[in-house]
Image (cartoon, helix red, strand yellow):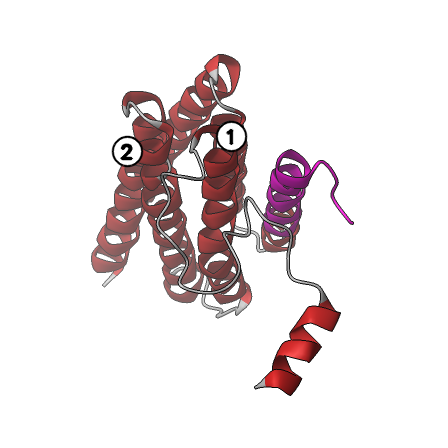
């Protein structure tokens, strides 16, 4: 039963990634694109943890932790670049 | 007992999948940028929370070991989601909202989106005056 639930969750988050890609492609604001990238990072973290459950290993937590940190820093850097024209003033 | 475990883990996995899908669908469905900000920052964060709860339960009940990594990821995501949402809202305000349309801040300085931050010397003089 867990296997089928896992496949359902994989499908949901994969479809979500496609939706985010659509929003990145169409825009129209740069804020929309940053938001879609941020959501993409969160969906990818979910997919990594789901893959860890599927494989039955705890290795993927470190990977998803790193993805979470890099995603947050890149969102803030992108926003600061749009806001101030520079990342570190 | 095994059936209860399977039902519990599957329930949280399906809940997480639905929340994640709703969050990403809201991103393409809603009309305005400020409306679109709501869907991913709340629903998708809940979706990740559901996945992490399912993972904790799976490794606790099926594999028989408890780890704090999931709690760390949950804490980090729940701390950073409001901060990135605030930054994205600021980006939108600077691009599309006029300075006349935002309410007054109630202090001597304007919104940080439009004005530079006050200089440290000014702050010091203000402290001496008061």
Cβ–Cβ under 8 Å for marks 2 and 1 = no
Q: Which residue is mark 2?
A: B22
- Provide the major secondary structure of the magenta segment: helix
Q: Report crowding for label 2: few under 14, some 14 to 19, many 20 or more residues within 10 A (C-alpha).
A: many
Residue at 36% x, 39% y is B101
2 or 1: tag closer to the N-terminus: 2
Q: Residue A27 or B73: which is nearer the viewer?
A: A27
User: Label 2 lies in what chain?
Assistant: B
**On the picture, is A74 further left or further right than A46?**
right
Image quadrant where one finds the C terminus of chain B: bottom right
- The x and y percentages for residue B75 are 48, 64
Residue corresponding to mark 1: B95
Relative to A25, A1 lies left or right: left
Residue furthest out toward the top? A26
Q: Residue at x 36, y 30 (%)?
A: B24
Q: Position of residue A55 (x, y in %)?
A: 53, 43
Identify the element where label 1 is drawn: helix
**In terms of image quadrants, where is residue B4?**
bottom left
Name the side, left or right, on which A70 lies relative to A14. Answer: right
Q: Which residues are magenta?
A: A68-89
Q: Are marks 2 and 1 on the same chain?
A: yes
Q: Residue at x 37, y 61 (%)?
A: B57
- Residue pushed farthest front? B129
The location of residue B82, given as percent across then percent down, is: 44, 54
Magenta run includes residue A81:
yes
């Amino acid at each position: 039963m867990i296997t089928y639930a896992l496949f359902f969750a994989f499908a949901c988050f994969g479809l979500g990634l496609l939706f985010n890609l659509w929003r990145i492609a169409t825009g129209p604001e740069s804020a929309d694109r940053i938001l879609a990238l941020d959501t993409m990072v969160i969906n990818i973290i979910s997919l990594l943890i789901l893959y860890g459950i599927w494989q039955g290993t705890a290795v993927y937590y470190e990977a998803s932790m790193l993805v979470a940190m890099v995603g947050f820093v890149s969102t803030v850097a992108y926003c600061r670049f749009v806001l101030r024209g520079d990342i570190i003033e | 007992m095994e059936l209860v475990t399977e039902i519990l883990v599957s329930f949280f996995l399906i809940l997480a999948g639905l929340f994640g899908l709703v969050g990403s669908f809201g991103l393409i469905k809603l009309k305005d940028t400020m409306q679109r900000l709501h869907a991913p920052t709340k629903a998708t964060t809940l979706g990740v929370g559901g996945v992490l709860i399912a993972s904790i339960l799976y490794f606790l009940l099926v594999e028989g070991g408890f780890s704090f990594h999931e709690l760390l990821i949950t804490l980090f995501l729940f701390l950073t989601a409001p901060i990135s949402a605030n930054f994205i809202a600021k980006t939108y305000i600077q691009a599309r909202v006029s300075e006349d349309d935002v309410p007054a801040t109630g202090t001597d300085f304007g919104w940080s989106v439009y004005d530079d931050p006050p200089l440290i010397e000014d702050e010091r003089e203000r402290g001496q005056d008061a």
